Amino acid sequence: MNDMTPIKTTPKDWETDQEVRWCPGCGDYAILKAVQRTMPEIGGTPENTVFVSGIGCSSRFPYYMETYGFHTIHGRAPAVATGVKLANPDLDVWVISGDGDALSIGGNHTMHLLRRNLDCQFLLFNNEIYGLTKGQYSPTSREGTRSPSTPFGSVDHPAKPCAFALGAGARFVARAIDVSKQLVDVLKSAHAHKGTAFVEIFQNCIVYNADVFAGFTEKANKDHQLWLENGKPMLFAGDTKGIAMDMQSLSLKVVDVVEGNWEAAGVIVHDVTNRTVAHMLVEMPFGEFPMALGVLYDDPRPTFDSAVIEQNAAVAKGKTPDLQKLISTGQTWTVDA
């Protein structure tokens, strides 16, 4: 028998015939294109891929990917994705959600997906606002955010998605920007991880929260981006500054790097398996510190789906399937006509 030749796809193969319906200038367009570019590079096939979404602007995503898809109900994408993966473990499952969908009504489901470590990719589009319902403040909106539901400014303390993920037990946590060229590399790293890969994507809502991330996303502000790479020093601002550990306070600090001598400045070398430093990176206050981007944490462990499959196989070993016996087990009765 001849071996099956793998079919190579192109980004075009992942596009549907549906009109993409987001506001002009929405960051979701850039994320969609990045995902479609990623699929051929990871060797994906449309018939073995599923996109599961909740409710929100981002959750229209399955309509625009030439794959299987579920547009589910508010906050429940993780639950549906879990069922999909357990029913067919060979499927490549991607979960698409927003900051409101994943961290408000869906916060509980997101937490359990992360702690269980289902083998899937979880993309959280964070625009710090409810876009679909016309601009109310969301769990990630900053203090002082004015919106129809907070006309005098929000007094809530915003949730930090990556800190939430790490606290819930996520084994892969990353950050990226919607229009960044590095987004594809981050998505490829997420896919290579065995387990739940959580990726927060800063997404610009052009209508209700425009340019909220401009402080580090605009080209003029690229010096405020800290792109992390495993085994490489934490340098930014054209390698003139770095992140070091203050040994007295056991906290991070920004240091100047003179003539490229980052070792003398005490700059930390990024280790993606260091969970403690990952926590510190996601908690860095922006302004005083740069925005940490790329893969912050990557330390695989056995997945939930593999454990379920292994357990089921062990329980079924040596047994013959018998549907009639199963139906007849326990209390039964006959209904006379």
Image (cartoon, rainbow, N blue to C red):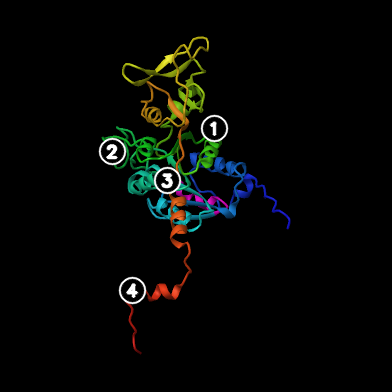
Residue receiving disc 3: 117
**Is 89 left or right of 139, judged from the image as shown?**
right
* Residue depth check, mark 2 versus mark 1: number of the one nearer the observer: 1
Tag 1's secondary structure? loop
What kind of residue is marked 4? Answer: Gly
Image quadrant occupied by the C terminus: bottom left
Magenta region's main secondary structure? helix
Please tell me in which quadrant of the rendered image residue 246 appears: top left
- Return the mark for residue 151: 2
What kind of residue is marked 2? Answer: Pro
Query: What range is drawn magenta here?
Result: 57-67
Disc 4 to disc 3, how far (Cα)?
35 Å
Please tell me in which quadrant of the rendered image residue 265 appears: top left
Marks 1 and 3 in Cβ contact (< 8 Å): no
Look at 48% across and 69% down and name the residue there. Answer: 321
Above/below status of 146 relative to 115: above
